[in-house]
Amino acid sequence: MPAPLPAAPAEPVAAEPSLAEVALAALAANPSPAPPPMPVAEAGAPPLPPAPAPAPMMLSAPAATLGPEAAPGGITGSADFRDLKLYQHTANADGSYRHLDMGLTGLVAAAGVWKEVRLKLFDRRGTVGLEFRRIRGWPAMFETWPEGGTDQFGPFWRLETQATAAAMAKLPGLGDRAMLAALLEVLPTLARRAARLAALPAEEQEAWAERGRAMAAAVEASRPEPPRPTGRVG
């Protein structure tokens, strides 16, 4: 009898891409159009109107790939991100204030994809908060800039574990709330990794992760409860 033929070698199985890799691929396939050239005013002509603010770098994500739709402001377990960069770690000598200034790319959730996000996670005498800036060097993250404060560096908006509901009321847009929900979901991981990049000891890394969890819990607790029925049945 003839000898049996050797079995064909098994083909390697490609690894499943991560959510963040899917997000970046979607952004690469749908690049944002280049802005039009700035017009130049002629001598003696009235001044030109100011240029419109840049639109946030956001692209709708494929729902079939990214899972069930997220409720704005809720935590769904579907958010991911691609890369993290630590801009600065600061801590006062007396420990009354400290922050992590960090940026991430490829933030993705069921509600959308955001190419770039930057934030400060801070602890001010036990009050944890997030700070966002509308200044040079920070990406345009919000569809509508929330009303906040201004200092010598420019406009900012803060969301803290104190007066959380009042700050959230200044962020009415569903798209902006979806971005914030995705950010809060990955915030403990972001904080821990940023603390590791700052070469902080393991206990400090976990302390920053806990601050991220506290911020997410404060936002979740600030959501209004659904109205209860008052009428009698029967």
Image (cartoon, rainbow, N blue to C red):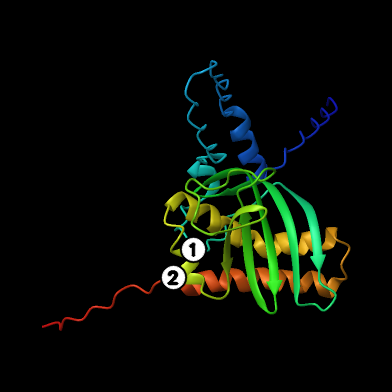
**Figure check: 46 above or below 86:** above
**Figure check: 72 above or below 166:** above
Q: Which residue is mark 2?
A: 223
Where does the image place residue 53, in percent across and percent down from the top left? 53, 38
Where does the image place residue 205, in percent across and percent down from the top left? 80, 69
Q: Residue visible at 67% across and 50% down? A: 81
Query: Spatial distance from mark 2 to mark 1, Cα to Cα?
Result: 9 Å
Q: Is residue 10 left or right of residue 142?
A: right
Q: Which residue is mark 1?
A: 74
User: Considering depth in this image, is 34 or 6 the residue closer to the camera?
Assistant: 34
User: Considering depth in this image, is 68 or 144 the residue closer to the camera?
Assistant: 144
Across the whole image, how many numbered discs are drawn on residues? 2
Q: Residue visible at 47% across and 64% down? A: 168
Where does the image place residue 73, in percent across and percent down from the top left? 48, 61
Find out whether the residues at labels 2 and 1 contact each other: C-beta distance under 8 Å: yes
- For the residue labelled by badge 2, is the local secondary structure a helix, a strand or a loop? loop
Q: Is residue 38 left or right of residue 175?
A: right
**Figure check: 13 above or below 208:** above
Q: Residue visible at 59% across and 28% down? A: 31
Residue type indicated by callout 2 = Arg
- For the residue labelled by badge 1, is the local secondary structure a helix, a strand or a loop? loop
Furthest toward the front, the residue is: 44
Q: Residues within 10 Å of mark 2 (few under 14, many from 20)?
A: few
Say which quarter of the image contains residue 217.
Answer: bottom right
Q: Residue visible at 84% across and 58% down? A: 197
Q: Residues within 10 Å of mark 1 (few under 14, many from 20)?
A: some
Say which quarter of the image contains residue 136.
Answer: top right
**Figure check: 209 above or below 80:** below
Q: Quadrant of the C terminus?
A: bottom left
Residue type indicated by callout 1 = Gly
Where does the image place residue 150, in percent across and percent down from the top left? 59, 57
